[in-house]
């Protein structure tokens, strides 16, 4: 067996003893502190904030009616792909047709009256110039003519309005898209007296969707346009979807004294797996640094007491300290712990970048040091360690 192999085996054994942190009972009954370790890694370091939101279609339009009536035909249905101008529904037009006919008759009647009034006005003007008719008769003839002319305009406007209402009885698609919902049944009466009833809800393109996410006021300052977003939905567990922040709305939402802001995330839905109304759990990437050396944040400035150091050294583990470091970590080596001064960089809370010194990947560092649980000592003690004096052997 080579010396290098022996060195690595002894190192692994020493690291296991440190990492597991099983109390080592010495003759005086003093046990070792429990030491947990973590490895140095080199990878992208990212910071993310979490939020929840609801998926919805982009370009959603509610299709309603401006006239009242009974639904006589119903061509549109859920999930139907339609083209702009395609007929979705038809209201009963009998009353509307009657209104158009009535308006046409009224217009014709008023036009006849206007023609009579116009001829009478012309005759009165001639007689007035000859001194036969009085000024009052001339003014009365003119007033009758102007009134008849106004009645014609009013009748014409009414006819146009009734024709428009007749056209509006045919409900057509305002754009190319998909019908998301149908809120009317065949034979149902819709009333548009006070508001416009919604008959259908359409979406322009379900291959592009958006998420309206609620971001806490404590995190909104980190959110910017064009940040990358990853999210999951309950319908597809284990699958990550991606999106991008496109809008940050300024109006806050306050619920039970909790302030949130709406962030719009644009989502590509080419496979149309995502559906409107799904709840999304988001991770918004606020920053990223590429391929940096990092350790778990709990390893930074980890304090080991003098008492713990003395017990470790009595067990044969060498502990070396650095004089007055500003920041440090504890390096785990075969049979020893070394306090190493460092310069820390970016941190996302769970891991922290190490700028100096250069640390090898997979190097073990101390992440947690604690005192052993006396009640669990007997159950967790390694069988390879000596049995404490007076203890029963199983």
Image: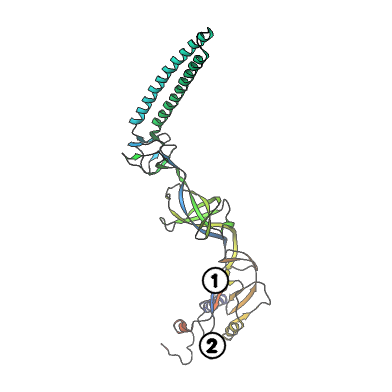
Look at the image and tell me whether residue 301 can be seen. Answer: yes
Q: Which one is in front in this view, the residue at disc 2 or the one at disc 1?
A: 2
Q: Nearer the viewer, residue 311 or 43?
A: 311
Of 27 and 375, which appears nearest the observer?
Answer: 375
**Residue bearing mark 2:** 30
Q: List x then y, in percent, for residue 347.
A: 60, 64
Give percent across and percent down for residue 179. 40, 42
- Name the residue: 37% across, 25% down: 102
**Residue underneath mark 1:** 38
Image point (45%, 16%), residue name: 117
Vertical relation: 175 (above or below) 384: above
Q: Residues within 10 Å of mark 1 (few under 14, many from 20)?
A: some
Q: Residue furthest top?
A: 130
How many other residues sit within 10 Å of disc 2, few (<14), some (14-19) or many (≥20)?
few
Q: Quadrant of residue 316?
A: bottom right
Cα distance between the residues tagged 2 and 1: 26 Å
User: In the image, what residue occupies the spot 49% across and 82% down?
Assistant: 373
Q: Are marks 2 and 1 in contact (CB under 8 Å)?
A: no
Q: 376 or 191, which lies in front?
A: 191
Across and down, in percent, residue 187 comes to 31, 39
Q: Is residue 126 above or below residue 147?
A: above
Q: Position of residue 104 (x, y in %)?
A: 39, 23
- In the image, residue 301 sits, relative to residue 142, either above or below, namely below
Quarter of the figure that contains the C terminus: bottom left
């Amino acid at each position: 067996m080579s010396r290098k192999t022996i060195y690595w085996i002894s190192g692994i054994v020493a690291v296991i003893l440190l990492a597991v942190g099983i109390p080592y009972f010495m003759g005086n009954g003093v046990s070792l502190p429990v030491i947990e370790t973590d490895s140095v890694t080199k990878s992208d370091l990212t910071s993310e904030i979490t939020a929840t939101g609801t998926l919805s279609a982009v370009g959603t339009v509610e299709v309603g009616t401006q006239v009242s009536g009974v639904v006589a035909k119903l061509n549109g249905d859920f999930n139907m792909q339609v083209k702009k101008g395609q007929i979705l529904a038809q209201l009963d037009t009998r009353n509307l047709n009657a209104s158009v006919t009535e308006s046409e008759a009224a217009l014709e009647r008023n036009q006849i009256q206007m023609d009579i009034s116009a001829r009478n006005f012309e005759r009165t003007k001639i007689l007035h110039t000859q001194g036969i008719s009085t000024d009052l008769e001339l003014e009365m003839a003119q007033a009758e003519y102007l009134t008849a002319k106004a009645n014609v305009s009013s009748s014409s406007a009414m006819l146009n309005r009734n024709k428009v209402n007749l056209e509006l009885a045919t409900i057509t698609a305002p754009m190319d898209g998909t019908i998301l919902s149908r809120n009317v049944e065949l034979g149902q009466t819709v009333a548009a007296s006070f508001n416009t009833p919604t008959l259908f809800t359409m979406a322009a393109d379900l291959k592009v969707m958006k998420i309206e996410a609620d971001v806490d006021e404590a995190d909104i300052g980190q959110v910017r346009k064009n940040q990358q977003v990853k999210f999951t939905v309950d319908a597809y567990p284990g699958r990550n979807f991606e999106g991008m922040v496109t809008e940050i709305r300024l109006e806050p939402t306050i619920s039970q004294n909790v302030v949130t802001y709406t962030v719009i995330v644009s989502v590509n839905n080419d496979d149309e797996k995502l559906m409107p109304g799904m709840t999304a759990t988001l991770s918004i990437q606020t920053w990223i640094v590429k391929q940096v050396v990092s350790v778990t944040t709990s390893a930074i400035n980890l304090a080991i007491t003098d008492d713990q150091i003395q017990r470790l050294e009595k067990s044969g583990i060498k502990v070396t300290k650095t004089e007055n470091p500003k920041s440090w970590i504890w390096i785990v080596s075969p049979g020893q712990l070394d306090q190493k001064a460092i310069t820390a960089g970016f941190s996302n809370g769970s891991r922290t970048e190490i700028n100096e010194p250069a640390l090898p990947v997979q190097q073990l560092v101390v992440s947690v040091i604690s005192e052993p649980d006396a009640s669990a000592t007997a159950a967790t003690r390694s069988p390879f360690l000596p049995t404490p004096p007076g203890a029963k052997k199983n």
